[in-house]
Amino acid sequence: MADLPATRARFPFRLGAPSARELSDAVRDHGDMPYSYEAVGGTAGDLPVGWAHDDETLELGRGQEVWDRARVALRRWSQFDLGWVRMADPDAPIQAGQIVAFASNQLGFWALNVCRIAYVVDDDDGTTARFGFAYGTLADHVVQGEERFLLTWDHASDRVAFRITKFSRPAHRLVHLFSPLATAVQRRFTRQALERLKAEVAA
């Protein structure tokens, strides 16, 4: 299938952080907007070829208490509590179809991005418990792609882990131009989000 358009005319960056009202309006305005990529749900299996991939895992601890605290932290979007990222609604429910907006400070400029939760994972096959979700980009996002946040609890080892998996590519001319820097920003988010959730669980 043909790729969706990867560029837009709207300038996506600004010097100041978006206000709470702007973030809230972004959620409302994108309610019926389609995904900006075709491989929706692609983080649930083999990542699509032709995209940049990122896949990192961090152990959070062991046991039921760690698992319970991690689930609560993920439901609170605690991995976004980084200072340079702002959620429109940290109480947004983890459910398929939910629109979420967040602003991120990238190299001194703020970008307003809007995504939709593509699917939710919440199961236990007796060997491993899993909880998490993936969201995908909508129009006006500076990249295209999908990102999954997944908690796992391996019952044999009692190990609880947090894994972030994503595939992406630039969706704006400036991001194309500075793609190495954009990739560095994305990987910075992955590392810090993993550590932030671990800190929340340990608190």
Image (cartoon, grey):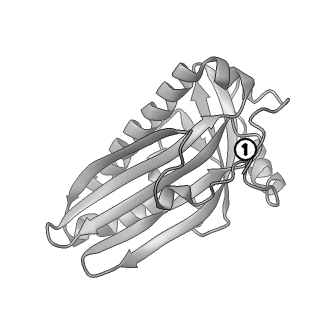
Residue 69 visible in the picture: yes
* Between 96 and 200, the one nearer to me in the picture: 96
The residue at the point 72 percent across, 44 percent down is 3
* Between 122 and 20, the one nearer to me in the picture: 122
The residue at the point 72 percent across, 51 percent down is 1
Residue lying furthest bottom in this view? 126
Kindly identify which residue carries mark 1.
3
**Whole-percent x and y of residue 149?**
45, 55
Quadrant for residue 93, please give it: bottom right
The residue at the point 31 percent across, 48 percent down is 57
> In this image, 9 relative to 112: left or right?
right
**Whole-percent x and y of residue 194?**
36, 45
Q: Secondary structure at mark 1?
A: loop
> In this image, 59 relative to 184: left or right?
left
Q: Amino acid at mark 1?
A: Asp
Other-residue count near label 1 (Cα within 10 Å), few / some / many at <14 / 14–19 / ≥20: few
**Whole-percent x and y of residue 132?**
45, 64
> In this image, 139 relative to 70: left or right?
right
